[in-house]
């Protein structure tokens, strides 16, 4: 079987491709595709596998994209920002009649695509297409599904948390996405969808070792869209985040509260520029001025915990109130890429039985099995990865 990975030479996608090569996979042909053919060829040479080849494509050229994917079995889209590229890529993939998966974490892209005719067209063609099977949404939200199936009769609240080290791999697109996420943070409260910028309210949350208790604030993230598709009448859903070190969190807090995430253009000495573009340029310049980690330094860095996350669930079982917290500690890059690859293999094997465009919580029918397979694969790839579950049963006398 053939897998085409759009944006396959990117830092996060490569963790997934290496995972594919580390075990017996259903895919015997893997095509790394992006605009930069020289970069693609260099990556192929470094991977040194007969299964892997390079292709050049600009995903905004729909005809060229069609030619690249027309004879594959599954398309894995790792090209962001998703609010700019996902619609046309999914549209072209439907025309080509191929199954699809991505690790989209852009709530604007979810809203745009699910409000369009793409889900209907995918279903009519009998295609299975999964949006957002990465770290979160993805592994973390599927972990919440697993907890629901094991410990609850009903759920009334789900809170998703994550905290990442600012040195985690990622380029300007990640920084730009971060500015978008703190500009507008939707959440569901008492059954009503609301919006507010990040940092207006903060909470303390214990991520466990090594991050411990951190200040967290709401952030705009797709779980507010995806999880209610699994539990339609859930009353409260929110996503909260922090950053490592604390100074990075405080830095983004100052940006957010200063209005520097606005896209409203200002005229600065005759030049129109938005506060967000200015903030992004400063952040990119700051990151570029730091010495880039060598491959060996990056490997050493990733031996430690560089990201923590958690799913907190409130609900009932046999009439008793319960609170579940599943804490995760590891590295964001493999936790983003490996779930995507497992999902791609499931699509190739026909293990995703539903059709249409789905979120992870809808597509993954055996949540507990998926969670365990993700943990096994990440550990086998050589990364530290811990999951700790805590269940509190509340009795009243």
Image: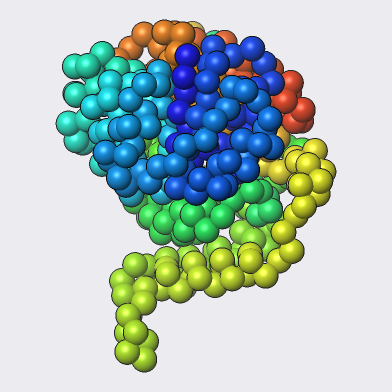
In this view, the residue in front, 293 or 161, is 293
Q: In the picture shown, does residue 182 fall above or below 332?
A: below
x and y percentages locating residue 35 in the rendered image: 45, 47
Q: What's the residue at 37%, 32% (across, down)?
A: 68
Farthest-out residue, bottom: 269
Q: What's the residue at 58%, 27% (across, down)?
A: 52
**In the rendered view, does 229 fall on the left or right side of 159?**
left
x and y percentages locating residue 111 in the rendered image: 28, 40
x and y percentages locating residue 292 in the rendered image: 72, 59
* Location of the C terminus (image quadrant): top right
In this view, the residue in front, 347 or 246, is 347
Q: What's the residue at 54%, 30% (across, down)?
A: 53
x and y percentages locating residue 210 in the rendered image: 77, 41
Q: In the picture shown, does residue 189 fall above or below 169?
A: above
In this view, the residue in front, 322 or 27, is 27
**In the rendered view, does 264 fall on the left or right side of 376?**
left
Q: Quadrant of residue 309?
A: top right
Q: Quadrant of residue 288?
A: bottom right
**In the rendered view, does 215 fall on the left or right side of 280?**
right
């Amino acid at each position: 079987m053939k897998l085409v990975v759009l944006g396959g030479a990117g830092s996060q996608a490569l963790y997934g491709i290496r995972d594919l090569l580390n075990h017996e996979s259903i895919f015997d042909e893997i095509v790394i595709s992006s605009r930069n053919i020289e970069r693609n060829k260099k990556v192929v040479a470094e991977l040194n596998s007969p299964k892997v080849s390079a292709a050049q494509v600009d995903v905004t050229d729909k005809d060229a994209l069609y030619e690249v994917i027309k004879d594959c079995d599954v398309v894995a889209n790792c090209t962001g920002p998703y609010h700019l590229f996902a619609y046309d890529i999914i549209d072209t993939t439907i025309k080509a009649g191929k199954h699809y998966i991505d690790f989209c974490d852009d709530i604007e892209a979810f809203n745009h695509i699910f409000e369009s005719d793409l889900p209907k067209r995918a279903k009519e063609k009998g295609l299975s297409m999964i949006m957002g099977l990465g770290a979160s949404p993805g592994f973390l939200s599927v972990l919440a599904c697993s907890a629901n199936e094991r410990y609850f009769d009903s759920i009334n609240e789900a809170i998703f948390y994550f905290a990442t080290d600012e040195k985690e791999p990622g380029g300007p697109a990640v920084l730009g996405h971060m500015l978008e996420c703190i500009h507008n943070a939707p959440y569901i409260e008492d059954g009503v969808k609301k919006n507010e910028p990040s940092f207006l309210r903060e909470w303390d949350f214990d991520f466990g070792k090594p991050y411990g208790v951190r200040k967290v604030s709401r952030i705009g993230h797709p779980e507010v869209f995806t999880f209610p598709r699994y539990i339609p009448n859930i009353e409260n859903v929110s996503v909260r985040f922090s950053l490592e070190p604390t100074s990075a969190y405080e830095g983004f807090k100052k940006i957010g509260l200063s209005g520097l995430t606005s896209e409203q253009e200002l005229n600065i000495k005759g030049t129109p520029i938005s506060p967000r573009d200015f903030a992004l340029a400063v952040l990119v310049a700051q990151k570029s001025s730091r010495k880039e980690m060598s491959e060996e330094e990056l490997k050493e860095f990733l031996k430690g915990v560089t990201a923590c996350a958690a799913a907190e669930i409130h609900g009932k079982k046999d009439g008793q109130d319960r609170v579940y917290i599943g804490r995760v500690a590891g590295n964001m890059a493999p936790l983003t890429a490996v779930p995507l690859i497992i999902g791609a293999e499931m699509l190739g094997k026909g293990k995703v039985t539903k059709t249409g465009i789905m979120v992870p919580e809808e597509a993954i029918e055996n949540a507990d099995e998926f969670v365990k397979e993700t943990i096994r694969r990440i550990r086998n790839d050589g990364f530290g990865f811990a999951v700790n579950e805590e269940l509190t049963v509340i009795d009243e006398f």
